[in-house]
C-alpha cells in the first residue's frame, strides 16, 4: 500500500464518530423476591452447576426453584427417618 492510502485510513479513523453506535447495556435479571426470602451464596462443583443449569433450561424454570425443591425434599426425607 502506498503512503497515501495509510494517510487516508488514519484520517478516516480520526474523523469517525464513535458515539454513533451505542454500547450494549447490561442489566441484572429481575427476580421475584418475597418477604420471607433471604439471599444466600455458596459454591458448587462445575459439573453439578452445569447439570443444574441444563435441568433448569429443560424445565423452563429458575435454578433457584430446583435448589429449593431439593432442600425441601432433603428435610422431608430426613424427618421420615
Image: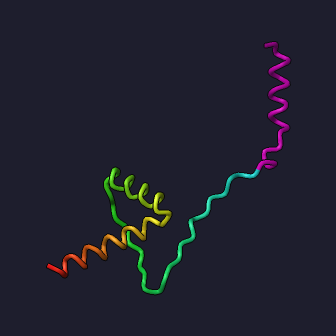
Colouring scheme, one of rainbow, by chain, secondary structure, one colour: rainbow
Where in the figure is residue 28, as x and y percent of width and height? 57, 65
Residue 74 vs residue 29: left or right?
Answer: left
Hey, which quadrant is residue 56 in on the image? Answer: bottom left
**Depth order, front residue of 73/14:** 73
> At 84% across and 30% down in the image, what residue appears?
11
Where in the figure is residue 50, as x and y percent of width and height? 39, 52
Hey, which quadrant is residue 27 in on the image? Answer: bottom right
> At 25% across and 79% down in the image, what residue appears?
76
Residue 70 vs residue 9: left or right?
Answer: left
Q: Which residues are magenta?
A: 1-21
Hey, which quadrant is residue 79 in on the image? Answer: bottom left
**Depth order, front residue of 65/58:** 58
Secondary structure mostly seen in the magenta stretch: helix
| Magenta run includes residue 17 | yes
> At 19% across and 77% down in the image, what residue appears?
78
Q: Is residue 42 above or below residue 45?
A: below
Picture quarter with the N terminus: top right
Q: How many marks?
A: 0
Where in the figure is residue 38, as x and y percent of width and height? 41, 79
Where in the figure is residue 68, as x and y percent of width and height? 37, 73
Residue 23 vs residue 79: left or right?
Answer: right
Q: Is residue 25 above or below residue 30?
A: above
| Magenta run includes residue 43 | no
> At 42% across and 86% down in the image, what residue appears?
36
Query: Which residue is situated farthest in the bottom direction here?
Result: 35
Amino acid at each position: 500500500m502506498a503512503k497515501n492510502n495509510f494517510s487516508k485510513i488514519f484520517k478516516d479513523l480520526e474523523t469517525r464518530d464513535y458515539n454513533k453506535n451505542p454500547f450494549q447495556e447490561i442489566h441484572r435479571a429481575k427476580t421475584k423476591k418475597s418477604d420471607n426470602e433471604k439471599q444466600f451464596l455458596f459454591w458448587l462443583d462445575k459439573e453439578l452447576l452445569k447439570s443444574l443449569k441444563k435441568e433448569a433450561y429443560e424445565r423452563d424454570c429458575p435454578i433457584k426453584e430446583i435448589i429449593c425443591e431439593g432442600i425441601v425434599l432433603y428435610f422431608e426425607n430426613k424427618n421420615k427417618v
